[in-house]
Amino acid sequence: MELDPKSNVPLHKQAEDVLRKLIESNEYKNGKLLPNEVDLAKQLNISRNTLRQAINQLVFEGLLIRKKGVGTKVAHKGVVGRLKNWLSFSQEMKMLGVEVRNYELLVNYRKPTPEVADFFEIDEDKYCVVMERVRGNTSYPFVHFISYFNPNLPMTGEENFTMPLYEMMETKYGIIVKTSREEVTARLAGEKVAKKLGISSSDPILIRKRFVYDVNDKPVEYNVGYYRADSFTYTLESSR
């Protein structure tokens, strides 16, 4: 925890390095609160302003989370979604080595919202098979999915939804999905989503809408995922 004031490396950068090592330690990496700023600055023998420079950088990088009245804690290592090559949720998790757990699974028939009806080009009175799932790793849930399926598909709601979704659709019905058009927005969780994900209603979430089409460019699934913002990072990669 000692810094070298004679080093050519600025003190706030040295403090960053110390905090990065702290973040990776077994004691802190699962979300434990850091010591308060006064105590930590004393331990490092630097000013609070210098310490805050280091903390602000790590907050910006998503490694630390600062909450007013609570303190600063290490962010849970989360999921990174990429736009360049579209993958299903199960494929994303498998690629990242994350063991997926289903915390909740509900399938029913429901009338579509106006946006869903418009996507499928159906009347709002026509019922759709709807699947809701709360999923996460083996430690905690981090996403609540709601999927509407095109009522013109032969799906009944009796399918084995414990299988990877698109694998099941291809195996059972020969439906091969190809394209996903996506929208990502942010907001506060609200009571319903907060209860599903075990967070506060005032915590931030990311909302990821997927408009899924088959190989014939026919709409198959309208999917909305509500992700814990401390567990999911969405990156875009573009090429010229």
Image (tube, helix red, strand yellow):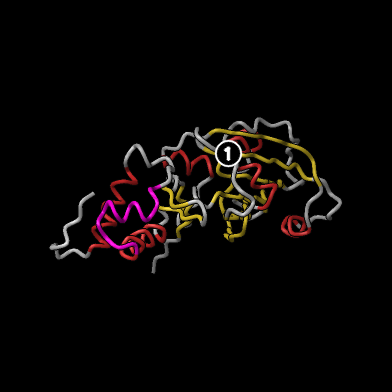
Within-10-Å neighbours for mark 1: few <14, some 14–19, many 20+: many
- Quarter of the image with the C terminus is bottom left
Q: Main secondary structure of the magenta part?
A: helix
How many labels sit on residues? 1
> Can you give x and y, in whole percent of width and height, for residue 2 in the image?
20, 51
Residue 102 makes an appearance in the image: yes
**152 or 16: which is nearer to us?**
16
Q: Amino acid at mark 1?
A: Arg
Q: Locate residue 100 relative to residue 120 in the image: left or right.
A: left
* Residue at the extreme right: 125
**Does 64 lie within the magenta span?**
no
Residue at the spot x=31%, y=56% of the render?
Answer: 41
> Can you give x and y, in whole percent of width and height, for residue 31 in the image?
44, 43
User: Which quadrant of the structure image shows residue 46?
Assistant: bottom left
> Can you give x and y, in whole percent of width and height, for residue 70 in the image?
50, 51
* Residue at the extreme left: 6
Q: Which residues are magenta?
A: 34-48
User: Which quadrant of the structure image shows residue 239?
Assistant: bottom left
Query: Which residue in the protein does label 1 denote?
Result: 135
